[in-house]
Image (spheres, rainbow, N blue to C red):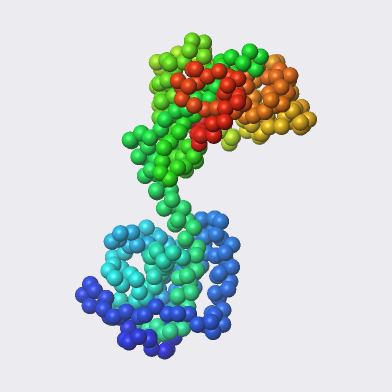
Amino acid sequence: MGNSPSPGGPPARLVGSQLVGTVSRFAVPEKALLALEPLLALQNAVGGAAGSMGRSSDAILRILAAVRERLGMDIAFIAEHVDDTSIVRFIDTGDPATARPGELISLVPMGGDGRENAVVVHEADIGVYVRLPIRFSDGELYGSLCGLSRTAGDPIGERDLNFLELLSQLVAETLESGHLRRKELATSRQMIMAIIDRGGMTMAFQPIVDMSTLDVVGLEALARIETDPPVPPNEWFDRAAAVGLDVELELIAVRLALSNLWALPAGMFLSVNLSPNVIVAPGFSAAMEAVRLDRVVIELTEHARVRDYEAIDAVLGPLRRRGLRLAIDDAGAGFSNMLHILKLQPDVIKLDINLTRDVDTDRVRRALAGSLVAFAIQTDATIVAEGIETEGEFGALRSLGVTWGQGYLLGRPGTLEADERANVPQAATSSEPAPESAPAH
């Protein structure tokens, strides 16, 4: 520790359970940087660790080790302030066996207005205790960078506090992105729970059309979630997956979509999107119990690799024997979708919109679409082309032998009543703007 006295008056003293007297927060002079040799290496370590929580944790532990060694402390730790509680998140004692992050702090006082300021305590019962606030770029107080020594040593001087101030800034920079992400997830979870508990989801339906006759053969259910500010529904499903509520939200969408099945004209099917993890969830089979499965198509939407195809097949097998049809969405978009086709042998293969786009002018897209049509013919599957928007695309796909089509040219999403009355040529010339909607997962 430095030998210069702490500025701003005598160091704070512990009186009962209260801290009295604080050391002012320091403005760090540029010349202080020259005297802090370890700082550059630490800063580089923090910068390189920003993309990984594990590497960020390592960088923070190195910072704590520097605090402990520089000041001769027995313990250095970082405490997060949560309401009126402070919780140790990172700790360095020089002995990993004694470092137990997550414990509540009872050793030293952490509450009160003192959280906002730098504090130094020299007390016979404690030894030396120092605390500096950790503050994010928007001014939010995250917690404190602390050091504790069981024995009284030299006074903590200005250079020591300048050193700690810089390290607290490094800690803040390292923690901020992850902290903000956790706050975003907590907010998302609250909003998704509100959707689950109180509703707020409706359904739109987009026609799937026979390419030869222009008859509407089915409807794809699309979820709409009304929020303020507006958020695209597919983003809500992504957020739900990030906080572990994807199964609940998707099952609500499935039940809502299937509740409209009775209103469809005879012979028309309803297509509903599902992720693989929802298919194997207990609530899925229950949702399908009282449904006319010969009028339902389940679209597997996940782009990631499925870990257990046998588990999915074990659930879908009995349902498919009762008439349920399985579709693989976004065929041609990547390896995982093609693997879905090989492993699950779907009844319907849906060409990805990026394969449909400009298929009339791009010979590579046309060749790949043609190969998937040939594959479907040989495996007794039906091909659906998504995202048809021009007469040229429609003509090229029909000439390739695509059975069914879907897209704004053939019909935009709308209410079920509007789709029942829809005349396909009229829908093809509609100028209605595209609604923000997503598949009914």
Q: Position of residue 100 (x, y in %)?
A: 39, 60
Q: In the image as oriented, which residue stretches furthest toward the top?
A: 266
Q: In the image as oriented, which residue stretches furthest toward the bottom?
A: 4
Residue placed most toward the observer, 351 or 268: 268
- Name above or below for residue 250 compared with residue 270: below
Residue placed most toward the observer, 197 or 9: 197
Q: Position of residue 205 (x, y in %)?
A: 50, 25
Residue placed most toward the observer, 3 or 6: 6
How many marks the image carries: the answer is 0
Say which residue appears at 38% left-offset and 68% top-offset: 144
Which image quarter: residue 200? top left
Image quadrant occupied by the N terminus: bottom left
Say which residue appears at 48% left-offset and 74% top-offset: 166
Q: Position of residue 39 (x, y in %)?
A: 54, 74
In the picture, measured across the screen, residue 132 lies left or right of residue 273, that is: left
Say which residue appears at 63% left-offset and 19% top-offset: 404
Q: Position of residue 222 (x, y in %)?
A: 49, 29
In the picture, measured across the screen, residue 399 lies left or right of residue 191, that is: right
Say which residue appears at 60% left-offset and 20% top-offset: 425
Q: In the image as oriented, which residue stretches furthest toward the left?
A: 16
Residue placed most toward the observer, 142 or 271: 271
Say whether residue 422 is visible: yes
- Name above or below for residue 78 compared with residue 155: above
Say whether residue 380 is visible: no
- Name above or below for residue 305 compared with residue 48: above
